[in-house]
Each structure stands twice: as C-alpha cells, then as structure tokens.
Image: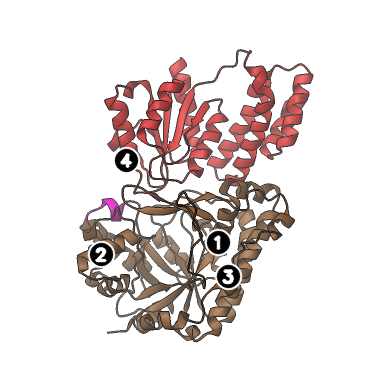
Chain colours: A red, B brown
C-alpha cells in the first residue's frame, strides 16, 4: 500500500511533521488506527532498530525516527483507546541508583515502544523500591535496569534481591544492560536477560511477551 | 636509569625506553584513599609514590568563585548547570539542564552570554603553579572536548537530533568551542609555561561500548573538521597531541590518526574490536598509545595477579619498540581495591 510505504520512508528519515500529516491522511482515507500503527509505524521503527543493531544507522537516526514515530502515535492515540489495539505488554525502565547516564536506557525505551510495548520510564538514579512500586502500579511484565558505571552496576543485584524478598520475583522478568554489564554478571546476580545493545533488548522483550501470551 | 622525560620521549619516538613509562589517572576518592595508604597529603605525592612519568595541568579560571544555586547545583566552567551525584563509591558532577536547549536558530546561540572565554583564565600565575612538577614529570595540558562540550550545552538527545536535522546548530556550537580551545592553547604558549608543556590533551568520546555514537559520515562532516582546525593550530606550536575517546573506536583509528594525533587514549580493552595486537600491528608505527588497563572488569573485580598479567600483556604488546604509556583505561574509580592499584604500579612490571 503506497501511503503506508510513504509513512515508513518519512519515519525512517525522521520527518516528524510529515509522519503526523500522513497518518492523518491515512485516517481520512478510512484506514483503522490499528492498521496504521501495526502496518506502517511499528514496522518502520523495527527497520530502524535492526539497522541500528547492524551499525548501519546510529544514535541520531534512531532518535529522529523515534520522535517521528511519536508524532504519528500522538495522532492515533485518542482513537486507539476505543479500539482493540492493546499494548503487547508493559516494561518499567530506569537507570539504576547512583547512575545518571540515561541515553542507553532511553534508546531501549524507544525501540521497545517501536515493538508496541508500553514503557514506563522511571528516569535515572532509580532506587530498587521505585522499580518495585512501578511494577505494582502498572502491573508490569518486565523490569529494565541500565548502568554505565562499574561502580553502579551492583545496584542491579539490589533490584533482583528486593523483588525476591517481596515475593515479586516470579511476576516479572528482569533485564540488565549497559557498558560494563555482561552475561556472566547477569547470571551471577540472578537476572533474567542480558542484552548487549538496545535493539537486542527490544527483541528479547518482544519475544518474551509473545511467548507469554501463547 | 632514564628520567621521566627521557623515558616518555623515547617511547613516543617509537624507541624502547629503559622501562615502560606510566601515568596515573584517578578520581578524587581514590586520591584520598591512596593519600591515607601512603601517609601523604597531596595527589602530587601519590604520583611520586607510584612513580608516574606524566601528569595533568589545568589553567585555572581568573574568577575563582563559582555561581551556586539553592539546591546545591552550580555552573561549571562551560556555563552548564551541574550537581553532585553520589553512588556507593564515587561522587560525580552530572548535568542538570542544558543552557542552549531552547535555541531555535543560530541567532539564539549567538545571543548566549555564557560562552567560554579564553581570556577569563589565569595565565599569569600558571607557570609558577606548574613549574614545581615540570622537572619531575612530563606535563599534559588538559584542554577540553568539542563534541562532548557541545552536547553538554545543548542536551544529549537534542544535539544528536540536530546533527541529523539542523546541522547548523551543532556546527555553530562546536565552532565556538573550537575557537575557545585554540585561543586557550595559544595563550598558554605565549607564556613561559610554553617551555614546560610538551603534550596537549584533547578529547571527544565518539564511541560507546560496541558502536560509534554517530555515523562515520557525521564524524567526517561535523566533528573531525573542528579537531582538524584545532590540531593544526596545536601543531603550529610544536606540541604532541594526546587524544582521548572512550569506546569502540577501532574503525575510526585511521581517521583519528589523520586529524592528526600522536597518541591515542585510552584503548578500552573490553570495547568492541579493541584488539591490542591488531591495533599495534596496523597503527603502531604511526601512533603511540596511552591507557589500556581495564577499569570495567579487571581493576575493580580482578585479583592483583590478574591485574599484573594484564599490565604485562599490555606492555608486551603495545610497548613493543616503545609507543606506549601504561595507565588505566579511564579515571580509576573508587570501586578498585587499593591492592589492585598497587599491583598495577609495581615497578618491575614496567621492565620487559
């Protein structure tokens, strides 16, 4: 379908105004909000995520694409509420306590949103209790913990331990990532998934949520 | 035995010194711990104890008082509001707001009244501040980043989006910072400090752990031209350029070399493709290296023996026929045990 392809091209080029305008046009032509979201916006963001993973595009291109996707979903959002286009699942994301580096976490948020996942962004310097409260409040499926520093990655264990203590460990999958984090570290602290980049994180979350539904 | 000066310059001329030169790169908390350990009172004495061959010097601002806000935040020397944020180990300055975030066009940028001013630095007293160290160690003049400073002024995500959508904004900001740095270095070199400072330290993180921060095309079109202009002026002053970028820079080393630079720091060993043997084989004749010891895993979480092995390996590979200054691959953070720091600086490891 011609119009959806144009939307995808404008989204990957980061043209937010054009995407908003074209999404409106698609609605006017009688397309359902769900079809526009799942047939144009999300697939385009998926392409950007894959290219990012393969070093074909970089941070600037992902950021402008995510902004363009938001411009499109903002047009759709009021209409999606009534329609049967529920979220694929809910993730709670934050950079751990003592760490203010949030760009990696923000990328994960954008690429997860590009997979149709609802992401509650807790920001940076997030204490374990805040993750827990947010999971309870939003009935979240996934906790995303990010850290840039070797001096803060230990906080991830505190998050895992708190969920354990509070009897919430089985309710969520805990994902960890960030420069110093490794698979060994993930195993050692008892987290569920380590991913080396934001696109892989979004893929893991989408696959997990899919399998949970099945 | 060579002096530190002889040792460093021999290594940078790609000849084998009596032993591998070393540098010491610490956070203030580590300094405090090492001062206690050694029973000394100043970071300078720590450098003596660890037999560092180099050290940083900074030109101080003329106006010493800092603009502070009620919430404890303050303006850094680039006019960016920052606050101290502590974790279990360290306290860092983190940016709170980007002063140029609201600019819509170049005219808005021009109107900002907090652009760093190279004339607002205290050159007059600089030489007397650094003279006591210049004989003992090779001095590196800390200058500044261009890309990184611009990002702090504009805000990370906005700056990155600007690069793709309105490049005139990043170009203007980076141009102003480049002007400032050039003037600062020129001013320093007009003073007697010129004779005491052989190395100019420049930086810009262009990479993350596994990838570049922006495309090679954007680096070439926007970031490198600033460094080329800056480095051309530094080279007119006959200085050695020590350039820092964290992360996975392997694919860009040839471009960095051609900025030009003389020494590449920090060779972050766990970043993607940062294979020391390959880097030394390909670039070792044209570039020297500074750094190399892992602060992400080996130093904070390894044993002293693992640290020793990593130091030996780095000196064996990167230090072959000179061309290497051994130090940590960033400021040593306070999660590194004292015994690992002491192991890293054992003198005998420096002899091949």
- Pointers 3 and 4 in contact (C-beta within 8 Å): no
Using the image as rendered, state which of residue A210 and residue B193 is in the foreground: B193
Q: Secondary structure at mark 3?
A: helix
Q: Residue at x 58, y 78 (%)?
A: B186
Q: Which residue is mark 1?
A: B78
As displayed, is residue A39 above or below residue B148? above
Q: Is residue A209 magenta?
A: no
When asked about the image quadrant of residue B8, the answer is: bottom left
Q: Are the residues flagged by discs 3 and 1 from a single subunit? A: yes
Q: Which residue is mark 3?
A: B181
Mark positioned earlier in the residue sequence (3 or 1): 1
Q: Secondary structure at mark 2?
A: helix
Using the image as rendered, state which of residue A23 and residue B44 is in the foreground: B44
Image coordinates of residue B74 in percent, x first then y, are 49, 56
Q: Chain of mark 3?
A: B
Q: Which residue is mark 4?
A: A185
Q: Report the Cα–Cα distance between label 4 and label 2.
A: 28 Å
Q: Which residue is mark 2?
A: B34
Q: Secondary structure at mark 1?
A: loop
């Amino acid at each position: 379908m011609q119009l959806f392809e144009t939307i995808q091209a404008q989204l990957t080029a980061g043209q937010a105004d054009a995407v908003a305008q074209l999404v409106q046009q698609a609605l006017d032509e009688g397309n359902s909000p769900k079809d526009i979201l799942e047939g144009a916006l999300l697939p385009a963001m998926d392409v950007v995520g894959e290219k990012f993973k393969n070093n074909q595009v970089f941070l600037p291109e992902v950021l402008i694409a995510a902004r363009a996707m938001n411009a499109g979903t903002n047009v759709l959002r009021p209409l999606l509420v009534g329609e049967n286009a529920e979220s694929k699942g809910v993730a709670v994301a934050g950079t751990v306590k003592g760490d203010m580096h949030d760009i990696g976490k923000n990328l994960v948020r954008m690429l997860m949103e590009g997979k149709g996942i609802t992401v509650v962004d807790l920001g940076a310097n997030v204490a374990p209790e805040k993750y827990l409260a947010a999971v309870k409040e939003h009935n979240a499926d996934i906790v995303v913990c990010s850290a840039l520093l070797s001096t803060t990655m230990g906080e991830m264990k505190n998050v895992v331990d708190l969920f354990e203590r509070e009897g919430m460990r089985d309710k969520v999958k805990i994902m960890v990532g960030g420069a110093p984090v490794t698979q060994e570290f993930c195993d050692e602290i008892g987290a569920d998934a380590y991913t080396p980049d934001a696109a892989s994180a979004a893929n893991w979350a989408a696959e997990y949520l899919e399998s949970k539904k099945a | 035995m060579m002096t530190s000066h002889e040792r460093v310059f021999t290594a940078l001329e790609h000849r084998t010194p009596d032993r591998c030169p070393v540098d010491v790169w610490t956070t203030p908390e580590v300094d405090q711990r090492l001062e206690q350990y050694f029973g000394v009172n100043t970071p300078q004495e720590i450098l003596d104890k660890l037999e560092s061959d180099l050290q940083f010097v900074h030109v101080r601002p003329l106006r010493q008082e800092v603009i502070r806000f009620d919430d404890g935040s303050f303006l850094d020397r680039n006019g960016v509001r920052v606050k101290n944020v502590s974790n279990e180990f360290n306290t860092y300055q983190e940016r709170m707001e980007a002063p140029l975030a609201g600019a819509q066009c170049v005219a808005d940028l021009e109107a900002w009244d907090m652009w760093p001013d190279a004339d607002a630095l205290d050159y007059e007293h600089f030489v007397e501040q650094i003279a006591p160290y210049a004989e003992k160690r090779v001095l590196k003049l800390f200058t500044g980043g261009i890309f990184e400073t611009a990002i702090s002024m504009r805000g990370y995500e906005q700056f990155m989006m600007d690069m793709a959508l309105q490049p005139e904004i990043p170009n203007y900001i980076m141009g102003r910072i480049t002007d400032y740095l050039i003037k600062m270095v020129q001013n320093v070199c007009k003073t007697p400090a010129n004779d005491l400072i052989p190395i100019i330290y420049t930086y810009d993180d262009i990479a993350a752990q596994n990838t570049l921060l922006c495309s090679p095309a954007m680096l070439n079109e926007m970031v490198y031209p600033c460094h080329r202009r800056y480095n051309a002026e530094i080279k007119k002053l006959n200085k050695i350029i020590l350039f820092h970028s964290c992360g996975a820079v392997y694919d860009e080393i040839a471009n960095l070399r051609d900025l030009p630079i003389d020494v590449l720091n920090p060779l972050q060993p766990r970043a993607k493709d940062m294979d020391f043997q390959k880097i030394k084989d390909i670039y070792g004749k044209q570039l020297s290296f500074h750094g190399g010891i892992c602060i992400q895993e080996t130093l904070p979480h390894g044993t002293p023996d693992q640290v020793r092995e990593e130091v030996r390996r780095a000196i064996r590979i990167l230090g072959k026929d000179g061309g290497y200054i051994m130090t940590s691959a960033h400021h040593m953070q306070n999660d590194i045990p004292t015994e690992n720091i002491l192991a890293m600086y054992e003198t005998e490891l420096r002899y091949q």
